Image (cartoon, rainbow, N blue to C red):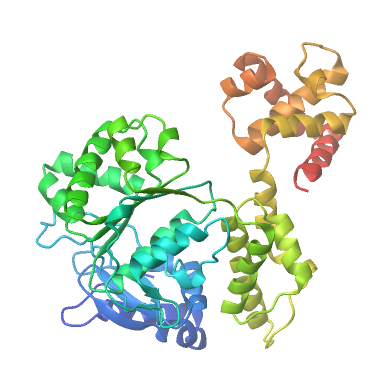
């Protein structure tokens, strides 16, 4: 596929891209998944599409997004960015954050909102109920019509709203859902990740365009910044955030923030910012209990017209229990892969069994198992495999019965966790040169097809991937 150029007066670049995709994936598939996308709006660098449902969005993201990013370009060979939204969630809008009359030499690219991160797809529970109710009220969102029924409420007494919680507790989902709902009204919401905010500050300073930066961030009605804990030690960014916060707050504009901890626990953040973060209301978000996680699974399955057997639900809960995000990602992959499998086999439908789920999610299961690994866990598993104690591996004892497990534990830590040699040395109480030598010893035995070492590695690997 070659680069496709936009012609004046019509989004011909998209039409040409569709023809290219049709040749690649076939007319029937293109009709079902691509030609049914509705062009809601476009300009020289943006194409706003409406999908009929969340399933079509997922299919596009998995099969088309990378190709579109690479091949969909305008006459100036600039990428045409595709913005997707689900029909019924409001017309896809040009980002409220776009600054008019900004010269081509300086532009601000903002984060896209995930079309699935809406209030409709959020599961309220005891762990997030207060935050959900407050943001829900802020937007005056009507879940029946999926629209904002009137202008967003003025909540000056709760400004800012500061949400905090660990990974997978719903911070990003709630912020994006709020932005989606606000943007359905005549008001403007800007969602931005902390990393993006930092990039914008640095770019504006280097280009001498801080006035344009400030115009972009201070012309919105609601500013939502995700993961403010990542501003740690970024002093120039914190300085600009301080002034942005003050300007918006004085203008009566809503500020909504999220972090992985409460304001008082933030590290290397200026005290004057921490003080302002606490001006409004600080709300914790906790991991969902198991039964609420089950509701997440059932709701997502329902969205794709699929009913899962309780045993499959239980399997997903047990296998991907680390966060809501991991369960959701696993379920979406399962449903998508099952759907494509049925299409390939030309079957209308078939039940998803636990055995089939394990087969379709084999790569994610392995990834999930590895994500839970730590050096301590690897050392413990290796020790148990050889029938020795963890302390024997960490000891200075040079008997072969301890040296071999120690070398293998170092090897697995390096291979599975990519831990630097110096840090591995600290874990095992050795200098980094000893660690390097031990890992090289194991590798050379593998290169020589040492059956004993290969069998030991295979045996330990099976345990690690359980």
Residue in the image at 69% along x and 86% along y:
347
Residue 217, placed above or below residue 454 = below
Residue in the image at 75% along x and 63% along y:
314
94 or 321, which is in the foreground? Answer: 321
299 or 32, which is in the foreground? Answer: 299
Residue 447, placed above or below residue 58 = above
Query: Quarter-wise, where is residue 39 in the image?
Result: bottom left
Image coordinates of residue 275 in percent, x first then y, are 31, 36
Q: In this view, does 232 lie to the left or right of 455?
A: left
Image coordinates of residue 291 in percent, x first then y, are 68, 63
Image coordinates of residue 295 in percent, x first then y, are 63, 68
Query: Quarter-wise, where is residue 6 in the image?
Result: bottom left
Image coordinates of residue 23 in percent, x first then y, are 44, 81
465 or 149, which is in the foreground? Answer: 149
Q: Quadrant of the N terminus?
A: bottom left
Is residue 428 visible in the rendered structure shown here?
yes
Q: Is residue 27 left or right of residue 200?
A: right
Residue 398, placed above or below residue 124 = above
Is residue 270 visible in the rendered structure shown here?
no
Query: Quarter-wise, where is residue 430 in the image?
Result: top right
Q: In this view, does 229 lie to the left or right of 170?
A: left
Residue in the image at 40% along x and 46% along y:
227
Count of numbered circles in the view:
0
389 or 15, which is in the foreground? Answer: 389
Q: Residue furthest right?
A: 387
């Amino acid at each position: 596929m070659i680069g496709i150029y936009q012609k004046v007066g019509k989004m011909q670049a998209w039409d040409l891209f569709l023809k290219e995709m049709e040749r690649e994936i076939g007319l029937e598939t293109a009709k079902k998944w691509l030609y049914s996308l509705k062009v809601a709006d476009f300009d020289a660098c943006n194409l706003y599409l409406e999908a009929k449902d969340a399933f079509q969005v997922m299919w596009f993201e998995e099969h088309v997004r990378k190709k579109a990013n690479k091949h969909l370009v305008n006459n100036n060979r600039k990428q045409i960015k595709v913005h997707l939204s689900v029909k019924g969630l409001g017309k896809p809008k040009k980002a409220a954050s776009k600054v008019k009359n900004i010269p081509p030499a300086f532009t601000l690219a903002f984060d896209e909102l995930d079309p699935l991160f809406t209030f409709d797809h959020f599961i309220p529970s005891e762990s997030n109920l207060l935050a959900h109710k407050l943001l829900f009220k802020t937007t005056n969102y009507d879940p029946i019509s999926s629209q904002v029924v009137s202008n967003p409420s003025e909540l000056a007494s709760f400004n800012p709203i500061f949400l905090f919680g660990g990974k997978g507790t719903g911070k990003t989902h709630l912020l994006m859902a709020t932005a989606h709902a606000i943007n359905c009204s005549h008001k403007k919401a800007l969602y931005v990740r902390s990393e993006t905010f930092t990039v914008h500050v640095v770019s504006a300073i280097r280009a001498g365009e801080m006035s344009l930066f400030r115009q972009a961030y201070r012309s919105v009605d609601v500013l939502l910044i995700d993961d403010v804990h990542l501003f740690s030690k970024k002093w120039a960014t914190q300085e600009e955030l301080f002034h942005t916060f003050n300007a918006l707050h004085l203008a009566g504009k809503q500020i909504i923030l999220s972090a992985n901890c409460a304001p008082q626990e933030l590290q290397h953040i200026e005290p004057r910012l921490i003080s302002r973060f606490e001006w409004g209301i600080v709300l914790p978000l906790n991991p969902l209990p198991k039964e609420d996680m089950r509701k997440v699974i059932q709701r997502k399955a329902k969205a794709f017209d699929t009913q899962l057997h309780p045993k499959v639900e239980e399997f997903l809960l047990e296998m991907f229990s680390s966060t809501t995000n991991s369960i959701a990602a696993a379920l979406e992959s399962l449903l998508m892969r099952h759907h494509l499998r049925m299409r390939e086999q030309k079957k209308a439908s078939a039940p998803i069994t636990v055995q089939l789920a394990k087969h379709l999610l084999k790569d994610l299961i392995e990834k999930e198992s590895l994500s839970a690994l730590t050096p301590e866990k690897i050392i413990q598993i290796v020790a148990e495999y050889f029938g020795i104690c963890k302390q024997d591996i960490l000891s200075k004892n040079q008997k072969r019965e301890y040296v071999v497990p120690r070398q293998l534990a170092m090897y697995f830590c390096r291979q599975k966790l990519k831990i630097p040699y110096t840090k591995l040395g600290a874990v095992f109480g050795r200098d980094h040169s000893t660690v390097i030598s031990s890992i090289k010893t194991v590798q050379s035995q593998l290169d020589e097809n040492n059956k004993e070492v290969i069998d030991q590695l295979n045996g330990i690997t099976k345990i690690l991937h359980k």
